[in-house]
Amino acid sequence: MANSQRRFFCLISVFALALSIPLASQNSAPQNSTAPASAPQTAGSDSSGQSQDQSLETLKVNVDVVQLFFNVKDKHGALIPNLNKDNFDLFEDGKPQTIKYFKPESDLPLTLGILIDSSGSQMRVLDMEKEVGASFLESTLRQKDEAFVISFDVDITLLQDFTNSVSRLRRALNQAKINTGGVSCAGGPLGPQGPIPCSSTGPRGTALYDAVYLASHDELSHEVGRKAMILLTDGEDQGSRLKIKDAIEAAQKADAICYVLLIADRGFYGMGMYSGDSEMRKLTEETGGRMIQVGNKIEKLREAFDQISHELRSQYNIGYVPTNTVRDGSFRKVEIKPKQHEYKIQARSGYYATPRHEE
């Protein structure tokens, strides 16, 4: 864990640099054009008569493959299983794309980040978050899955780097403590600059956007496969150096789905209003997750975690080779459209076409 933590904190020195998510690519040539029998396959054939039954690994050779994980729901919000690629049309920037890979991925290893708000507004709900969060990890994580835990308040703290151990993750959650103190530019718990570049101007209370950026940039961007983060927060940010758009971009480049459990202690706010829900809704919709209103009710929190667990185990994986081969770093909008119009797709809004020299 010590080496992992050093990597996490050393990377903060490049915090202001944008890291784009590379499209999957390799330089070696394939030995044959057919996927091995043990690899994931999809049915179908192209106009030349060649089989399209090829694994995603085969597709990665000498081409750039975009892959997305997504859920399909009916008009009541129930998950729809047992669909195939013929149920969908796929578009990039409005132009139709050919689906090369399609498979349900309920058993694909999952990399998960838990981000827990430990600012003053969470004082009366933090223990609830720890308890239910630990139960969620215990019921959701499987042998090949990994998770990490970050707490954020005036500081951003990696409490536990990647591990499959639920007991370690539980201990990490229990280490989260309410912190309303200030960050001094003379020093901080994560080094002389604290977790991010320090400034003596402006209030700093809940570095939410910075935490999402760091979880995406320093942790999830280095992983492959299915990735998600779950934020337990009231959605209020105070004092982040970055903006919500920066957090969204980092999550998209890391191919990370963001879920937000909006936990707000009404007693803390009194007659005042909190407004974090609009930004959190934007974060989740752009990354293919969703925001769930919890309030301060433990049963609602349990239900929300159950919903997320089911969604993560009921995803589809779709892959295609973009017709636009220019890698200019621009954002490409991707739409998965169901042929059953009453179905709703929950997927990230697109990807960044990363130049090769940035990979």
Image (tube, rainbow, N blue to C red):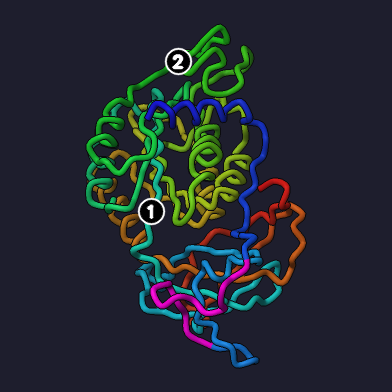
Residue drawn at (27%, 48%), measured in percent from left and top? 300
Residue 285 in the magenta stretch? The answer is no
Question: Looking at this rendering, what residue extends furthest in the front direction?
Answer: 31
Q: Earlier in the sequence, mark 2 or mark 1?
A: 1
Question: Front-most of 211 and 121?
Answer: 211
Give the x, y percent position of residue 323.
Answer: 71, 72
Q: Amino acid at mark 1?
A: Leu
Q: Main secondary structure of the magenta part?
A: loop
Question: Front-most of 71 and 192?
Answer: 192
Check residue 110 in the rendering and tell me which mark sits there, or answer none. Answer: 1
Question: Front-most of 282 and 321?
Answer: 321
Give the x, y percent position of residue 83.
Answer: 41, 79
Q: Secondary structure at mark 2?
A: loop
Instruction: For the N terminus, give its image quadrant.
Output: top left
Give the x, y percent position of residue 171.
Answer: 25, 30
Residue 23 appears anywhere in the view: yes
Q: Is residue 330 left or right of residue 259?
A: right
> In the rendered image, which residue does mark 2 sit on?
189
Q: Amino acid at mark 2?
A: Pro
Give the x, y percent position of residue 55.
Answer: 49, 72
Residue drawn at (30%, 44%), measured in percent from left and top? 164
Q: Secondary structure at mark 1?
A: strand
* Span shown in magenta: 29-44
Question: How many C-alpha atoms fall within 10 Å of the one at disc 1: few (<14), some, or many (≥20)?
Answer: many
Residue 32 in the magenta stretch? The answer is yes
Question: Front-most of 9 and 95?
Answer: 9
